[in-house]
Image: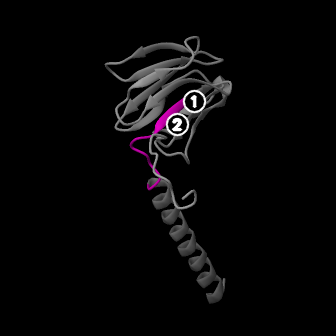
Amino acid sequence: MKKSDYILLISIAVISLFAYFLMRQFLGSTNLEDGTAIVLYKDSPILEIYLIDGTYEIIDNDGVVSIDEENYLYIVSGVNGDVVIEYKDNQVRVIDEISPKHICQVQGWSSSPLTPITCLPNNVVIIIEADKSDDDPDDITG
């Protein structure tokens, strides 16, 4: 390899690392402390978990199996079995579910609208939405 090849490889590596850390910073800045985690089963909302304090609202009683208020565990039904959702420190995650590769559990904690938790083998999706109680107009709507 020539000297110019090494320079090109090092330049690509530096640019890639810069882009990686920039994206990590951007994703970290979108976390919400007062948002709502909406649990969807087959595209229908069944449970809302408020990230500010872990309180909840059951939308569909058939989809919610049980709730452990002391440990902040929410158990909802999935296609393959129950999906256990945990709340802690303004974040939610799936800690137990039945699927071939346990993709839901691997996704980890989420409190950002940009990182939903998807458990497609169980048809369960957890999306994060911003708190809608803020009635102040933004720059666009005036």
How many numbered marks does the figure carry?
Answer: 2
Quadrant for residue 49, please give it: top left
Residue 32: image location, x then y, percent: 43, 46
What residue is rendered at 49% in x and 18% in y?
75
Examine the structure image and report whether residue 112 is included in the region drawn in magenta: no
Q: Quadrant of the C terminus?
A: bottom right
Q: Secondary structure at mark 2?
A: helix
Quadrant for residue 117, please give it: top right
Residue 66: image location, x then y, percent: 46, 12
What residue is rendered at 67% in x and 26% in y?
121
The kind of residue tagged 1 is: His
Q: Which residue is mark 1?
A: 102
Using the image as rendered, state which of residue 70 and residue 46 is in the foreground. Answer: 46
Is residue 100 toward the left or the right of residue 28 in the image? Answer: right
Q: Quadrant of the N terminus?
A: bottom right
Identify the magenta region: 29-39
Do the numbered discs 2 and 1 sit on residues whose CB atoms are within 8 Å? yes
What residue is rendered at 35% in x and 18% in y?
69
Examine the structure image and report whether residue 38 is included in the region drawn in magenta: yes
Judge whether 14 appears above or below 4 on screen. above
Q: Residue furthest bottom?
A: 3
Q: Residue furthest front?
A: 142
Is residue 135 toward the left or the right of residue 16 in the image? Answer: left
Could you tell me how far apart the alpha carbons at marks 2 and 1 are, in whole angstroms?
Answer: 7 Å
Label 1 neighbour load within 10 Å: few <14, some 14-19, many 20+: some
The kind of residue tagged 2 is: Val
Residue 53: image location, x then y, percent: 34, 32
Q: Secondary structure at mark 1?
A: loop
Structure colour scheme: one colour
Mark carried by residue 106: 2
Is residue 11 toward the left or the right of residue 95 in the image? Answer: right
Using the image as rendered, state which of residue 75 and residue 54 is in the foreground. Answer: 54
